[in-house]
Amino acid sequence: MEMFTTAIGNVFNPMCLFLIWGGTMLGIVFGSIPGLSATMAVVLFLPLTFGMEPTMGLALLVGLYMGGISGGLISAILLKIPGTPSSISTVFDGGPMAERGEAGRALGVGSIIGIVALIFISPLLAKVCLLFGATEYFAVAVFSLTIIAALSGKDMLKGLLAGLFGLALSMVGMAPVDAMSRFTFGNYQLLSGFDITVLLIGVFAVTDIVQAGIGRRHLADGFEKKTYHLKGYGLSVKEFITQIPNFIISSVIGIVIGILPGIGGSTGGLLAYTAEKSRSKYPEKFGTGIIDGVIASETANNAVIGGSMVPLLCMGIPGNTVAAIFLGGLLVHGISPGPLIFQNSGEYVYGIYLALIVSTIFMVIFERLGLPIFTKLLDIPKHILLPIIMVMCCVGAFSSDSRAFDVMCVLAFAMVGLLFKTFKLPSTPLIIGFILGPMFEENLRRALMASHGDWTTFVTHPISCVFLVVAVVFCTLTVRKNLKEKKAAEAKGEAFDTAEEEG
Amino acid sequence: MNSKQLDMLCSAIFLVFGGVMLKFSLSIRHIIPTDVGSGYVPIFLSICILITAGAKLVLTLLDKKPAKAATKSESDLVGGLGTVGLMLLYVIAFEPVGFLLSSMVYLFAQILLMSNSENRKPVLFAVISVALPLGIALLFAYVIKMPLPVGILGF
């Protein structure tokens, strides 16, 4: 209790509050610019915290982390470009909502549940994490790959091809375990593989610009300054109540994904989106711009933050890249994460909890106050806005690794995206395959090395077995549902459209 | 092209991609005896791609339903090729020419290409094309402290 009181005193002083506010604001700016990320924000400002008192330094980093993850939704909704990989699934419904002039509704979602989970159940969940090894992570990767089945639209084979292509792209560069170079064709730039940000920018943003160029004669058609509904936070009390199960389920998914190292917010958002779509009474509306999809994606993204702090604080295992940098920040300030952290550095841990809560409040206020400014972006005529976005995309691609090669890759991936659109291949499975590829391969190889090549290891480990069984059941149900819909459509004499449904 | 022809072309492209990937995957060396090797997953993936693309091709060929005719879109070849061409020149010039100059030229040309006779305002386009890259370059140089490429001209 004494430590908690000290933490309150440390956090609720004007300087600390100013640092949290500043960190959150800067984080949102970083998150909202495609190519800049929460990771970059925390890395850039980490050296600045060295000279600060631990609570102050950590408060600044917490603000940057929270704002950086949340800021991605701004460009995801307004420009249909995920500012951060975590906001991929926000684009599906946030983009169409903004096109209809409902950007305000799409931007008001919070993250308190993740922090509550961090405070109350972190020690318990940390124990579960200790049970995960390579075998279990491989099973989690396989389970996560089954999302492809649900996101493939009506043509599962096309979705599968897109997912396999994403997995194939992730194989480029140095292999895990033995660092063998693969598919580099003598180009040293390919040794580190493709950057996820570059792939995202190319497939999601630049493809749209090329398409706009093809349809340039109609760019000005129907252009009029839209009026946005910006009352409150975009959700009525009735809507909020009906969305409570969505909030809870998505938060739980986000927390679990955050706790499991190496998966990250993008998978959390996608899993929550898919879960909500499967649960929904109107799954066909997902991708056309409904608030359910945005809430599922963003609630899970924000809950990942709380989740990723659990193994970080209790075991010193970072759940994602930002958490790894955050770990560096803790060590610099003489705080050793581990089971004894509550006894040795309790006031700082409680300080982090409080900073997370304060940062969430600042984030909600700043994003709401900034809405009129953010939504003004949409009033810029497309023939001016799209070339500006292209420049920002190139800057984003360059800044992700300071390589001009990445800028060229953006255009290459835009051409891939254009081919996908021509062949009506869904692009989301491509991204999922790309994200999960390294995790799938590395853990498969490590697990088989540990079991001396015995494949039964995946079914003899209970956690792995459960994930694999759930994956098979989920896939079977999705295929059955798909075939049923196809038969129903044929019985009605309607053509079964195989076009992709994503936003 | 109608939907059936597009599906067949798509399957054919993936069959070629899978075949090429398999060829290169088979040549990946296996160095750790206890490991399945770096070629294992790529070989598995390429076989999966070949099977899936093959299945898609067979199903498309067996599909007796009449193919949907392609929707006739008023696509503008000059606009499309022009946009891709400008982007290509921009990404190539990004490092050697520098961010500022390449972005200014690209922005002006691209905005001009996308505008029509009614909304074409060259002076406004020129102001935007100069001000925006300048603002971004200053932001990156002095606030983010991550300079963008300066190019052979030194700015």
Image: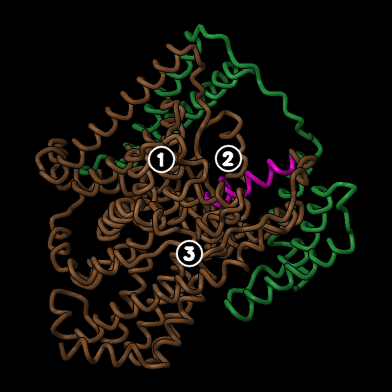
Horizontal arrangement in the rendering, residue A188 relative to residue B39 (left or right): right
- The number of callouts visible is 3
Neighbour class for label 2 at 10 Å: few (<14), some, many (≥20)?
Answer: many
Horizontal arrangement in the rendering, residue A8 relative to residue A498 (left or right): left
Q: Quadrant of the N terminus of chain A?
A: bottom left
Tag in front: 1 or 2: 2
Specify the segment rendered in magenta. A199-214
Residue A260 is situated, as x and y percent measured from the top left of the image, at 25, 57
Chain under numbered label 3:
A
Mark 3 and mark 2: span between their CA atoms?
Answer: 34 Å
Q: Is residue A212 magenta?
A: yes
- Write down the quadrant of residue A472 in the picture: top left
Above or below — where is A322 with respect to A346?
Answer: above
Above or below — where is B47 with respect to B64?
Answer: below
Chain under numbered label 2:
A
Q: Secondary structure at mark 2?
A: helix
Mark 1 and mark 2: span between their CA atoms?
Answer: 16 Å
Q: Give the residue type that dot 1 points to.
A: Leu
Neighbour class for label 1 at 10 Å: few (<14), some, many (≥20)?
Answer: many
Residue B68 is situated, as x and y percent measured from the top left of the image, at 60, 16
Q: Colour of chain B?
A: green
Q: Which mark is residue A233?
A: 3
Residue A59 is situated, as x and y percent measured from the top left of the image, at 37, 82
Nearest to N terminus: mark 1 or mark 2: 1
Is disc 3 in contact with disc 2, using a CB cutoff of under 8 Å? no
Is disc 3 in contact with disc 1, using a CB cutoff of under 8 Å? no
Residue at point 45%, 40% (across, down)? A286
Of residues A179 and A45, the one nearer the viewer is A45
Q: Which mark is residue A167?
A: 1
Neighbour class for label 3 at 10 Å: few (<14), some, many (≥20)?
Answer: some
